[in-house]
Amino acid sequence: MSVCCLDRKSVPNFDSFRKAGNSGSLPRRGSFERLRSSGSEKRRSWSPEEVSANLDSFRPVTLTVSSFFKQEVDRLSDDDLYKFLIDLKRPTSGLKKLKSIPGTLKLDISPCPEEVKYCLTPELARLNPYPDDKGRPTKEVLEFPSREVFVPHYQYRNLLYVYPKNLNFASRAGSARNIAIKVQFLAGEEEHNALPVIFGKSSCAEYKTHAYTSVIYHCKTPNLYDEIKIKLPAILSQQHHLLFTFYHISCQKNMAPVPFQTPVGYSWLPIFPDKRLKTGEFNLPVSVEKPPAGYSMMSTDIQLPGMKWLDNHRGVFTFKLESCSAVHSLDIFLDNFLTLCYAVEERRLPSNITDATIEAELKNSITNLQKSAIERLVKFLPLVLDKLISLLVRPPVISGQMMNVGQTLFETMAHIVRALVMELDFHNDQHGRNGLLATYIQFSCTLPHPDANQSAGVSCVPVAMQAPPYRAASMLAHSAAARSSSNPDLSGGHARPHDDFSRWLDVAPCAARPIERTGSMRTSYDSNVHMMMGPVYKKLVHEEVVLQWVVSSGSVREAALSNCWFFFELMVKSMAQHLAETDRLDAPRRLRFSEQYVDDITALLNSIVADIVQRYNKDYKLIHGLNTSIAFFIYDILSLMDRGFVFALIKTYCREIAKKITTVTDSYILINLKLDFLRIVCSHEHYITLNLPFGTSLTGSAPVSPSPSMTSSQSAGSTLSATSAYRDGVKHANFADLSSAYKHQHYLVGIVLSDLAAALETSNASVHNRAINLVKNLLSCHDSDPRYTDSECKSRVAALYLPLLGVVMDSLVQLHDASLTSRGPPSHVMDAESGSQSHPINQNVAMAIAGSSVFRRPSASGIEELDPFKTRKMQLGAENTRNLLSCFVWVLKNASRRTIDRWWEDLSQTQMQQLLDVLYFGVSSFEYKGRKYLKKQNQQLSHKNTDIKSKLEDVILGAGSARSELMLRRREEKNPPSPHMSGDRVLRWRKDKTHYKQAMEQQEKPRMEIEYDAHIEGNLATEASLIGLDMLEYIIQQCERSDSLQSSNLLGAVLRVMQHLLSCNQSELVLQNVFASQRSLVFKFPELLFEEETEQCADLCLRLLSHCSSSLSVIRSQASASLYLLMRQNFEIGNNFARVKMQVTMSLSSLVGTNQSFNEEYLRRSLKTILLYAEEDTDLQETTFPEQVKDLVFNLHMILSDTVKMKEFQEDPEMLIDLMYRIAKGYQTSPDLRLTWLQNMAGKHSERNNHAEAALCLIHSAALVAEYLHMMEDRLYHPVGCVAFQRISPNVLEESAVSDDVVSPDEEGICTGKYFSESGLVGLLEHSASSFTMASMYEAVNEVYRILIPIHEANKDYKKLASIHGKLHEAFNKIVHQQGKRLFSCFYRVGFYGSKFGDLDGEEFVYKEQPFVKLPEITHRLESFYSERFGSDDIETIKDSNNVDRNKLNPDKAYIQITYVEPYFDLYEYRSRTTDFDKNFNLKRFMYATPFTSDGRAHGQLGEQFKRKTILTTSQSFPYIRTRIQVIGRKQLVLTPIEVAIEDIQKKTAELFEALSQEPPDPKILQMVLQGCIGTTVNQGPMEVAIVFLSDVASGSKPASNYHNKLRLCFKDFIRRCGDALRRNKTLISPEQREYQKELERNYKTLFEKLGPILLNARVCIAKA
């Protein structure tokens, strides 16, 4: 579990940068500089972990260079060389110009070992380990990085590098071609003044007095690449200079006495003019003659008389100087400041500065530090800050006057700190603390402290009690009372004494004690030892810093506020060092610091809190930093200052926050700030001690703390007051809830729990998350703290958090129920209104969260309580609920039995019920989900944040978002704090700093970590369940002792939680204990299950049966024993266990119908075990109990046998439903079981979105209940059995009850379920109405409510009636609006042929399918299913719809015939079935047509085309509780060709009529129908029909018949409808469709002209006939 750690201590231990060594070697400079320069500077995108990982995996490599070329400057310049290097890998003609030099260079690159032996620093100092002088040394190379490395000088280094670049001797006459340059570093002008400070080469001495450059043969303008390294003396003078002597090197081989080297020129450079080291690039003239005396003090730019210079005194020699020095700053502003500091310290003023101007010059140099280059300032950061602090507390005194530089110093420090934080933001941690500054405070700073004893005078008053004396006039007086060097007019009067601590904590002041005791085990402090022996002569750093901070204003104060952490940590370090150096660590806390300092601290924090309150929504980044910094400061001074005073600061903070919260709407920002403040303060190592966990009226009497808060009189006072209150008879509840007595004694934890309670009242998820995590992290720390491992200690700690139990119980309606999807919440839990994120926080709640944690004035009732129903409560998330409940469980686990007893005594019955409901939620929250679930969750969380909602809120509010950071940088760009320090800053949008970016970059956990998490989750689930079970046992014991508790519903709630434990995934250990507790409960209170909680009896049987099928034998034996005991207990009450028998049978049926994961074999073993128990139970052998158990087990085995088939057809939904239907039909005489299976079928249908079938299952269930309600209680407003439901479906008559002599409702165990009641009937009907609505069968909804309305009218439930009529209104509106647009189901006839189908062989069914299912889809589905079952080679589909001749089928194969069918109605039925719903509801007859000809072909000419209509009748009407119904009747009609023609023409006419009848008319549909009737492509259709069947009649060659007359009349109606359609279309078309209209009219005219004669002659012939 995560602990409440303090992240701010991000500075590594400085000792880790060094390694121990002897006095002869320097401490090893480890990888600090290398890592910082290579890892965090050059590659800022790499984290240190990535650098380390890359180096660890780096393999040694060898680089070989074999290409060397000679570069002659006059022939090949550097630019040309770079061009050739590009072509080096691809040979070109250009490379031939270069002269190659044979040679090979090998570079071996490998990772540096952990410990390098024989290593030398760049200064050739030995690093440990250096075992002996025999090994070959390894030399560290000093890096000159391309980018500046911002690391201060942590060791002495003073090096100068000389780089000769080029020389031009072309104008010199004579032989000066082979030129070498001799370089010397001289402290004078004589040869012996050459200092041995030049580092030698590898084969030379370590240090030499001179160095030569390389010689380029026959070149008067050589380019040089030498490096000359010089170790600079610590002290330089103006005589130190570099001397360059130029020689011509002779290369002749003759033996003539020719000198080896001849000087040909001289040049020099003064290295320390104006007392500053010279660096950079120089171009010097070269003298032909030796320099004259005194040359070292002069520059070569001066034209000396009598001197001869090359090239007319022009610069011919170019070189560069690089310095790496911890002595010379190379910055004019730093140099000026350090020089003046040295001058005032040594009291040696420069000649150009007088006593009158020194103060102005010093102030100017201090202010100009802000203009220093940031990289130079960083190099000398420790030194600069030490000097500034030293001047702050020890201001210089000149001519008896103290300089007034305090405010200037503080301003400069503030600006330097802000510049470092802003410029070097890559050094900042998550709190904005710069690593360099933090390192300085922790390791580097040297704070000045006054001496403990002074020689002048003796004072017998402690420092803290001395009145500040007046400011002295001169430094010689050494006045310690000068509180400020910048404002001499500041008053130095006393602050009020701190004796009256009640003004901080609002409690009665305690009796004064003669001496305070410390909070440690040290002996009492002797005040005489620490009396000052004289006046204090020096100021203290912490006092002066806080004073200057308090009096600062404007930009100085803003700069200090933006980085207040630096000054706070500096003050804390100064305070700690002051106490250590003055030996005050054992002193009473009230006497450690002066009254004035305490007042300054109070004033400073008050002003900062005021800034937080006023600017919280303007600059969140600044305010968050302020809030965090003062929290850490208070955290630190809790260990140094008087804790009563620190508590007063905490109270002031809370009070000011509270005042602001009550006046704003966006108060949750302030609430989050306060919670962050508490998180830091409460992480103090002595947090428990600060809360005074001593004896109270709740935990029992105990002596007052053996070590009260370190001299905080208030601490002891609150303990005494609590003890006295206990003696006066204060209730235990005062310390079990957030009462004044509790918060007075347990101060900090009172704040935390009060804020938690108030935070839960808000409607902000971020506030919930922070408040709950605050408590969770505190408890995590306590649990892992080795100081509290003892059970007694831990119980005292748990007693501190006892009010947390009440807080959680009060927030019951907000808890997230993890089992809500599968199990309902406890019956006592009301649904909470979901809070809106945008809903403003109630002001009362805001006041509570801000001010309830501090000691407010008592109200009239003595305790201010927050009404939980005054504000809307927002539901907690799953993670927050889990964390809150983990805290709840921890307190229950660790609280002592005595504490729990006293807490329980004061609980009301409502609170007891709430406790059980919380335990119910806890079981769900800690349920073990398994490794697969954790792995899936980890994959999801690897792509998004665990708390995305709170992050999104922060981004929306502008806190931590990329936009807010960009805007902040823009504002800083427009208003820079210092133009010199931030002018060259590169502004960039750093996405890696934004919160959401970090959240999105979470990496997926490795497999081992997931395994570990799963292990932890399992253990946590087990522990939480066992703790909850222990509490249930405790409640059972309390109920045994109290008759009033037994009469309440408390035991029923206990049983409900136990059943919930059984229903969740539990470990073997938990289940064994739960079974034992359940058996004990049933044994102690048998009437609870069989008389009071009858519904829970059914649930318990279901849970026990499910565990009887467990794969673990231990669990099966336990479950079997519990189930047998349940039967036995029920039998002993009335010599019959019919109730349990019925419930077990129903439970098994429900288990089979809903749970497909149970194991049949294990369940049979458990049933056999129960049978053995009955046979071997000697006490009941003489009764009928064993025989009844045997009958029950036999019935259960029969049910299991039916499940075998169900499992076999698990993938065939139709067959599965048929089997469930068969089982339900077998329970026709067992209404409870039939109802169970009907509900199982409804659940299956709902899973497959067959809502109409699910609704019918519920209607059948309701009809069954109504039938038995009518038999038991004949009420007028109840439906009269199944007949009342006949209007919905005629199939409901199946639920008619048999005669009373077969089944009596009054029999024990019959119709005892929760649905066999009026409320159960209402629930079934409402559920069915919802299913009908989802099926778009709104007309059926009306019929359902027609039955339901009289019941609500009789009960005068007008709220329900209003809801029902609202739903009916909505249903009727949908009927109107969806007229003609509703899609109804389609139907297919499916025939099965072949012995492989078993019982289905030769059977025909009508399948009901979804509206969009086409023939190929259902064919493919059935083919795929049966192909997997029988094999693809053994299944065939009959493609046509003709009658099947079974003699022609292969007996070894299975055949399926699928045909689309339509509902069929007789003519009289159309009168009642006028709507689309009527034509698609309660369907029992279907028809499909098969075309054929007399010669056996399917299709022929019009005159030969016959049609066979097949009418099928099903056993029940659709929709039904099944999606397929068996065909029980078949009828066939054969239509002659003319009858087929008549039917076709009538069909087209009907389509025209329907298109014309649409309101409003649809032009597209109308034109589509017209095109099909008179379009050019179909004109031959009607015309061909008329010619074939009427032309012979019209010519008189064939006698007319009634069919001919009917066809003529059909054509007449057809022509008339076409004309009507054309006229209607003409009124609907747009102008661009006029041509199309004309085309249709021409077609119609053509059709009319051709059909007219035929129809007219036919009419005449028919009339004659």
Image (cartoon, rainbow, N blue to C red):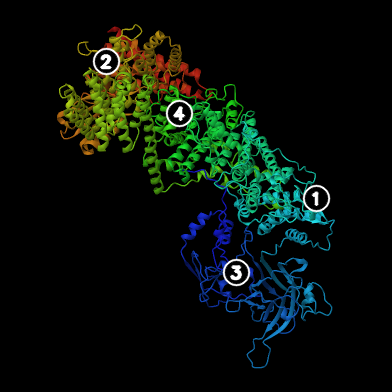
- How many marks can you see? 4
- Residue marked by disc 4: 903
Q: Residue furthest bottom?
A: 256
- Name which of mark 3 and mark 4 comes first in the sequence: 3
> If you read the primary sequence from the N terminus, does the residue marked by circle 3 or circle 2 appear first?
3
Indicate whether 712 appears above or below 827.
below
Say whether residue 455 is left or right of residue 129: right
- Residue 1254 can be seen in this image: yes
Do the CB atoms of the residues marked 2 and 1 lie less than 8 Å apart?
Answer: no
> Looking at the picture, how far across and down is residue 414, in whole percent?
70, 49
Residue 361 showing in the rendered view: no
Residue type at numbered disc 1 = Ala
Q: CA distance from mark 1 to mark 3?
A: 52 Å
Q: Secondary structure at mark 1?
A: loop
Res 472 label: 1
Give amino acid for label 3. Answer: Pro
Where residue 105 sits in the image (x, y, percent)? 52, 73
In the image, farthest residue toward the top: 1276
* Disc 1 crowd, CA 10 A, few/some/many (<14, 14-19, 20+): some
Which residue bears the numbered disc 3? 122
Under tag 4, what secondary structure? helix
User: In the rendered view of the protein, which quadrant contains the N terminus?
Assistant: top left
Side of 1563 where 1296 appears, left or right:
left
Q: What's under tag 4, amino acid-wise?
A: Trp
| Mark 2 surroundings: few (<14), some (14-19) or many (≥20) residues within 10 A | many
Lower position in the chain sequence, tag 4 or tag 1: 1
Q: Which residue is mark 2?
A: 1295
Q: Please, what secondary structure does the residue beneath circle 3 have?
A: loop
Type of the residue with mark 2: Glu
Cα gap from disc 4 to disc 2, whole angstroms: 55 Å
Front residue of this view, candidates 1039 and 318: 1039
